[in-house]
Image (cartoon, grey):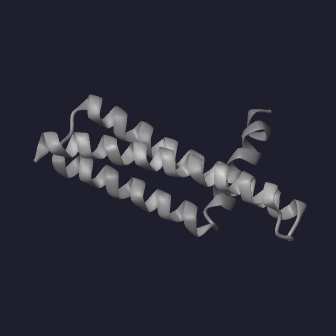
């Protein structure tokens, strides 16, 4: 029963790895984690890093899903579809900038 509930979620995770933008976010997350190991960051800093990595990867998955829905609805240029895609991309930008500022705050403490 539980396996049935999680199967679509795991399939979604694996399907997402076919997309370059998601793979890039996983790579950047791994680099952030490696930097944390090298800098020997505190447990509180680890919490911030893990939350930021999760935030960015989550927004990238949602952005990709929204792009898929929009592309499924129409392949024609449409101002509303562009606005929807731009909003989703903006969410990725906000989460990425949040992660960047967090990383800068942590790095400054260790440099």
In this rendering, position of residue 29 left or right of residue 74: left
Residue at 48% x, 58% y: name it.
25
Image coordinates for residue 93, horizontal then vertical, percent: 51, 51
In the foreground, 94 or 44? 94
Q: Residue furthest front?
A: 79
Question: x%, y% of residue 71?
Answer: 81, 64
1 above or below 91?
Answer: above
Q: Which residue is situated farthest in the left direction here?
A: 111
Q: Identify whether 97 is placed above or below 48.
A: below
Q: Quadrant of residue 6?
A: top right
| Place of residue 82 in the rendered image (x, y in percent of width and height, measured from the top left) | 74, 60
Q: Which image quadrant: the N terminus? A: top right
In the image as oriented, which residue stretches furthest toward the top? 44
Q: Is residue 3 left or right of residue 105?
A: right
**102 left or right of 90 in image:** left
Count of number-bearing discs: 0
Quarter of the view holding residue 2: top right
**Foreground residue among 100 and 28:** 100
**At which x and y percent is residue 50?**
40, 40
Residue 15 vs 98, above or below: the answer is: below
User: Nearest the camera: 24 or 96?
Assistant: 96
**Residue located at (82% from left, 69% from top):** 77
Which residue occupies 88% across, 65% down? 74
Left or right for 26, reference 59: left
Residue at x 40%, y 59% (from the top left corner): 28
């Amino acid at each position: 029963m539980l396996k049935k509930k999680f199967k679509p979620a795991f399939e979604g995770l694996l399907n997402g790895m076919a997309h370059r933008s998601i793979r890039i976010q996983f790579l950047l997350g791994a680099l952030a984690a490696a930097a944390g190991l090298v800098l020997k960051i505190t447990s509180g800093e680890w919490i911030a890093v893990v939350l930021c990595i999760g935030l960015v990867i989550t927004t990238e998955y949602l952005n990709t899903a929204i792009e898929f829905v929009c592309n499924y609805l129409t392949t024609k240029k449409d101002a509303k579809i562009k606005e929807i895609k731009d909003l989703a991309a903006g969410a990725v930008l906000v989460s990425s900038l949040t992660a960047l500022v967090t990383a800068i705050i942590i790095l400054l403490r260790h440099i």
